[in-house]
Amino acid sequence: MLVHNWRAVLRHAWSVRLMALALLFIVLEPVINFVAATWVSRNLYIQLAMSAATGLFAVAAIVARIFVQQKISGELNGKPPAEG
């Protein structure tokens, strides 16, 4: 079941933005590793940096998900919206 303001959540939630960045890094990682392998003989540091950035974005998205964002949550202040 979707939340009542799912469009606003997709546009404004930091957790969604950070997960999109993590997805971008997941998609770009093999491409960057391939290109780096042709230029640099040891691309271990590039692989580690890409994996670390992906992990950090994912963790930041989890942390961002638990904080109230006034633009999305409005005046709920942690209370669930009225059923109806």
Image: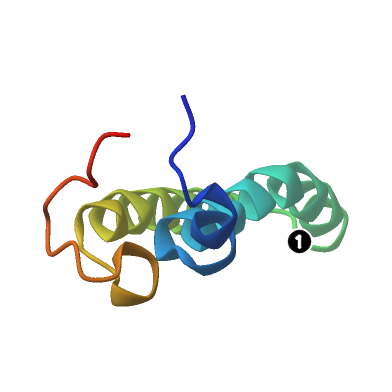
Q: Where in the figure is residue 20, as x and y percent of width and height? A: 60, 54
Residue under the image location 18 percent in, 61 percent down:
76
Amino acid type at circle 1 is Val
Residue projecting furthest to the top: 1
Say if residue 28 shows up in the picture: yes
Counting the numbered discs, the total is 1
Name the quarter where the C terminus is drawn. Answer: top left
> Around disc 1, counting alpha carbons within 10 Å, would you say few (fewer than 14), some (14 to 19), or many (20 or more)?
few
Residue projecting furthest to the bottom: 71
Q: Quadrant of residue 30?
A: top right
Front in this rendered view, residue 9 or 81 = 81
Describe the colour scheme in one phrase.
rainbow
Please indicate whether residue 9 sits to the left or right of residue 36 in the image.
Answer: left
Front in this rendered view, residue 6 or 49 = 6
Q: Is residue 67 above or below residue 83?
A: below
Q: Where in the figure is residue 36, as x and y percent of width and height? A: 78, 58
Residue under the image location 53 percent in, 48 percent down:
6
Residue under the image location 12 percent in, 56 percent down:
78
Residue under the image location 45 percent in, 63 percent down:
13
Q: Where in the figure is residue 64, as x and y percent of width and height? A: 29, 60
Q: Where in the figure is residue 28, as x and y percent of width and height? A: 74, 51
Please indicate whether residue 68 sits to the left or right of residue 62 in the image.
Answer: left
Q: Is residue 21 above or below residue 69?
A: above
As helix, strand or loop, the secondary structure at mark 1 comes to: loop
Q: Quadrant of residue 77?
A: bottom left
Front in this rendered view, residue 13 or 31 = 13
Q: Which residue is mark 1?
A: 40
